[in-house]
Image (cartoon, rainbow, N blue to C red):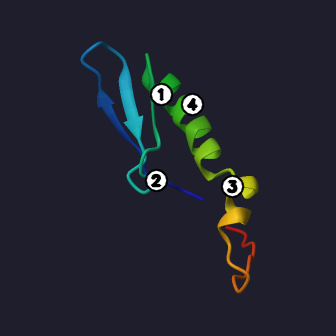
Amino acid sequence: MRLKVVLEPSDEGGYTVYVPSLPGCISEGDTIEEALRNIREAIELYLEPVEDELVPLLSEAALLEEIDL
């Protein structure tokens, strides 16, 4: 999977980085390299399934399937 990220210089120094296709997925770092490492971790956490929270929301007629990306 390839995602585009946006790096913006921060007023306080360093960089803020976010993923436009993943709302709320944002991180920062003192250098570009650090910011990119941090956003990779943020993306992994963002995309990590949270089955515990999903199951109570399903109705009896709902189907739960898994897909590979």
Q: Amino acid at mark 2?
A: Leu
Mark 1 or 3: in front is 3
Contact check, label 1 and label 4, Cβ < 8 Å: yes
Mark 4: give few (<14), some (14-19) or many (20+) Cα within 10 Å.
some
User: Which secondary structure, mark 2?
Assistant: loop
Disc 4: which residue: 37
Disc 3: which residue: 53
In whole angstroms, how far apart are the C-alphas of marks 2 and 1? 16 Å
In whole angstroms, how far apart are the C-alphas of marks 2 and 4? 17 Å
In whole angstroms, how far apart are the C-alphas of marks 4 and 3? 28 Å
Q: Amino acid at mark 3?
A: Glu
Mark 2 or 4: in front is 2
User: Up-down: is 14 above or below 28?
Assistant: above
**Quarter of the image that includes the C terminus:** bottom right
Reading the chain from its start, which is encountered first: label 2 or label 1? 2
Q: Which residue corresponds to the image point at 36% horizontal and 24% vertical from the top-left?
A: 15
Q: Amino acid at mark 4?
A: Arg
Disc 2: which residue: 22
Q: Residue furthest bottom?
A: 61
Disc 1: which residue: 35
Report the disc number at residue 20: none
Picture quadrant where residue 45 is located: top right
Mark 2: give few (<14), some (14-19) or many (20+) Cα within 10 Å.
some
Rendering coords of residue 43 (x, y %):
57, 44
**Quarter of the image that includes the N terminus:** bottom right
User: Which secondary structure, mark 1?
Assistant: helix
Contact check, label 2 and label 1, Cβ < 8 Å: no
| Relative depth, front residue between 56 and 64 | 56
Q: Which residue corresponds to the image point at 73% horizontal and 64% vertical from the top-left?
A: 55
